[in-house]
Each structure stands twice: as C-alpha cells, then as structure tokens.
Image (tube, rainbow, N blue to C red):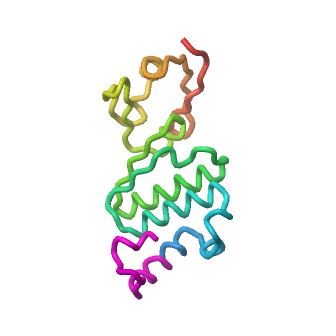
Amino acid sequence: MGRKPHSSWKAGKRDKKITAGIISEMGLETIAFKELNNLSGGQKQKVFIARAAAQQAELILLDEPTNNLDLKHQLEIFNLIREEVKNGKTAIVTMHDLSLVSRFSDRIIMLKNGRVFSDGSDSSLSAAKINSVYGVEVSLKEHNGKKIIIPEKVV
C-alpha cells in the first residue's frame, strides 16, 4: 500500500524491491503476509511506519505512535523512527509522554492554548514550563544525559 503513490494499479519490479528492502530493514518478514487485523498493536504500528517509509516521502508525520504499546514496542517504534531520520527523513511526532519525547527528540515544541510556548532541545524542558503547559508539578531526573519527567501532583 505504501507504494501506491508511485505505481499504477499493479506494483512493478521497483516497487517490490523497495518494499522487500523495507520489510527486511524493519524485521517484518514474519508478519509481512498476515492480515492487518491479526497483528498486535505494536506490529500494526511497525507496519504503518514501514508503509510510510515505502512512500519514500521526505517528511513523516506521526500522531502518538506509541499509544497503548508496551515498553518493548515503544522502543522498537522509536528506533524505527530514528533509523528513518538517520536515512535523511524528517519526522514530526506529536506526543504527551515527555520522558519519551526527551529521550528521542532533537527538537521539542510545547504548545499552550494553540500557540508555541517553548521550542528547543530536551535541555529546554523545565519543571516550570511543564507546570505552565500541563498544570502539573513535576520532578525532573537525569539518566544518560536525558530527562525523565515524574508527575507529582495536579496544581
């Protein structure tokens, strides 16, 4: 499906080669021919990212790509996104899990009332900014140079 923007009704040799390469790169060989409805949430997310990669678009937009996924699948999804970025793509991801955002993002934009409130790297995340945007007091801890956000209480 990801090659549809580039092909006619029937996929050509180039489309099949690109798709096979992405399936291999993303480790999807064991699920490549399964029905989408029979896949787990994490497997579906991987397929959706693979479909986006097959389109060979320069920009990938993802809305909460790790929602409802266990820790293993969250990490796998972000590692796949990171690989796409390393391959020259730009990924814009909307998320509410600030610890994951801190760990995997090069740039973090926080919105408040539909406007940019903060724009910077994970070092720009502060307890005061998070409090202002979310109305929650947080503690910030560092682990391997990245911030972990611990919600403490609603203000």
- Residue 87, horizontal then vertical, whole percent: 38, 64
Relative side of 151 to 130, left or right:
right
Judged from this view, the residue extending furthest toward the top is 155
- Residue 34, horizontal then vertical, whole percent: 64, 72
Residue 14 located within the stretch drawn in magenta: yes
Magenta segment boundaries in residue numbering: 1-20
* Camera-nearest residue between 11 and 71: 11
* Camera-nearest residue between 104 and 50: 50
Residue at left 56%, top 32%? 148
Residue 47 located within the stretch drawn in magenta: no
Relative side of 37 to 129, left or right:
right
Residue at left 47%, top 66%? 51
Where, by quadrant of the figure, is residue 121 drawn? top left
Where, by quadrant of the figure, is residue 144 drawn? top right
* Camera-nearest residue between 136 and 3: 3
33 in relation to 71, above or below: below
Total labels: the figure holds: 0
Judged from this view, the residue extending furthest toward the front is 9
93 in relation to 136, above or below: below
101 in relation to 155, above or below: below
Position of the C terminus, as image quadrant, is: top right
Where, by quadrant of the figure, is residue 12 drawn? bottom left
Judged from this view, the residue extending furthest toward the bottom is 13
Residue at left 43%, top 78%? 18
Relative side of 68 to 132, left or right:
right
- Residue 126, horizontal then vertical, whole percent: 44, 23
- Residue 101, horizontal then vertical, whole percent: 48, 39
